[in-house]
Image (spheres, rainbow, N blue to C red):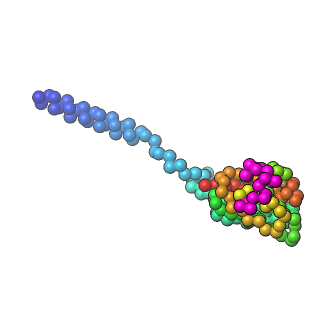
């Protein structure tokens, strides 16, 4: 009877020790955060956390007649981008591709422009200012329909 007790205690110690060894070798869990590397000089590099880049609920893009500036902006979904034409340059912001503007909504210009709910990323008429609320996550190239060689890009993130 006493021998049995000793064997049970020994088994518990062996199993417990084995579990401890196994657990101590389990790698640390990945926290899922983005980690960049910063060189602090003298050859030492330390990891740093990097947050979302330039991601707010609003952005403003200026059009000067030949370029959008900044041409690429990132906003959160549901956020708005306001496009402003400076100096009276003719501007009609629209999702690519030119000339049908199907990229954002999947509908053509002639189909979505009469829709006054404005669910399409398409200004639909030339004007000095255009504000659009982005409800779809993704990267949305756009151009000036009045000067179709001028491009930009809106990236919408969660
Ligand atoms: Cu166009």
Look at the image and tell me in which quarter the N terminus lies: top left
Pinpoint residue 143: horizontal percent, then vertical percent. 81, 56
Farthest bottom residue in view: 87
Can residue 73 be seen here? The reply is: no
> Total of numbered circles in the picture?
0
Q: Nearer the viewer, residue 147 or 44?
A: 147
Quarter of the picture holding the C terminus:
bottom right
Whether the magenta-drawn stretch holds residue 53 is answered as no
Helix, strand or loop: magenta stretch: loop
Q: Position of residue 95 (x, y in %)?
A: 77, 54
Residue drawn at x 33%, y 35% is 18
The image shows residue 57 at horizontal and vertical percentages of 64, 63
Ligand 1 image-quadrant field? bottom right
Q: In the rendered view, does 45 fall on the left or right side of 67?
A: left
Q: Is residue 116 left or right of residue 25?
A: right
| 148 versus 63 height, above or below | above
Q: Position of residue 69 (x, y in %)?
A: 78, 63
Magenta-drawn segment:
101-118
Residue pictured at 14% horizontal, 28% vertical = 3
Determine whether, in the image, residue 45 is placed left or right of residue 9. right
Is 10 placed left or right of 98 in the picture?
A: left
Compared to residue 120, the image places residue 130 above or below, namely below
| Res. 2 image quadrant | top left
Instruction: Tell me the residue at 81%/54% (across/down).
Output: 109
Residue 16: tell me if it is visible: yes
Residue placed at 88% from the left, 58% from the top?
147
Q: Residue furthest left?
A: 1
> Which quadrant of the structure image shows residue 86?
bottom right
């Amino acid at each position: 009877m006493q021998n049995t007790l000793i064997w049970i205690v020994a088994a518990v110690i062996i199993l417990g020790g084995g579990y401890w060894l196994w657990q101590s070798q389990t790698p640390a869990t990945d926290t899922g955060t983005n980690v960049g590397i910063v060189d602090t000089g003298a050859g030492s590099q330390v990891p740093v956390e990097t947050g979302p880049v330039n991601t707010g609920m609003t952005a403003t893009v200026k059009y000067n007649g030949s370029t959008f500036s900044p041409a690429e902006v990132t906003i959160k979904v549901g956020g708005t981008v306001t496009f402003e034409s400076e100096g009276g340059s003719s501007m009609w912001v629209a999702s690519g591709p030119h000339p049908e503007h199907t990229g954002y909504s999947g509908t053509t210009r002639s189909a979505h422009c009469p829709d006054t709910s404005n669910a399409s990323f398409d200004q639909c008429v030339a004007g000095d200012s255009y504000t659009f609320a982005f409800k779809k996550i993704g990267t949305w190239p756009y151009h000036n329909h009045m000067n179709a060689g001028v491009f930009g890009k809106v990236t919408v993130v969660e």
